[in-house]
Amino acid sequence: MARVTVEDCVEKVPNRFELVVYAAQRARNISRGEELTVDRDNDKNPVVSLREIAAETVVLGALRSDLIRSQAREPEPEPVEEDVQDLVPTEQNIFGLQEVSAEEEAVDEARAIEAALTGRARR
């Protein structure tokens, strides 16, 4: 039965390699629980997927996008430098800013006021 199905499918998808990839993706989708579009007739998932492709009851574009999505991988994050680490939000610091103590903040304000009064630029 599978041989006749493959011959029928080649009319729909001329490239045999593409056909195999589509059928494999559809078989994976069936294994994950997607509904069948043809009767199973005691066939395994790969044969059912080929029968669906031959009967044109599945959209090949959707299978293609499923395949691309399943093969996509997220890139590894780049290592963060120590200077930038303080700007990265964490669970404890949701704003991503370095926490400054009240004493450090007071010293910074005093320096800013002194620089404003004397006319010097802040360093």
Image (tube, helix red, strand yellow):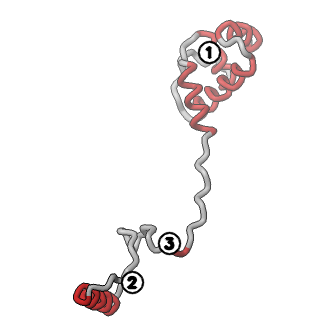
Q: Amino acid at mark 2?
A: Arg
Q: Residue at x 51, y 25 (%)?
A: 35
Q: Residue at x 41, y 70 (%)?
A: 91
> Which residue is label 2 attached to?
123
Image quarter for residue 103? bottom left
Q: Is residue 45 above or below residue 111?
A: above
Residue 33, image x, y percentages: 54, 33
Q: Amino acid at mark 1?
A: Ile
For the residue pair 6 and 61, the one nearer the viewer reads as 61
Q: Is residue 117 left or right of residue 96?
A: left
> Which residue is label 1 attached to?
53
- State the separation of the CA atoms marked 2 and 3: 23 Å
Question: Which badge, 2 or 1, is on the more N-terminal residue?
Answer: 1
For the residue pair 64 and 118, the one nearer the viewer reads as 118
Q: Residues within 10 Å of mark 2 (few under 14, many from 20)?
A: few
Q: Is residue 104 above or below residue 57?
A: below
For the residue pair 21 and 48, the one nearer the viewer reads as 21
Q: Secondary structure at mark 1?
A: helix
Q: Amino acid at mark 3?
A: Gln
Q: Secondary structure at mark 2?
A: loop
Image quarter for residue 53? top right
> Which residue is label 3 attached to?
85
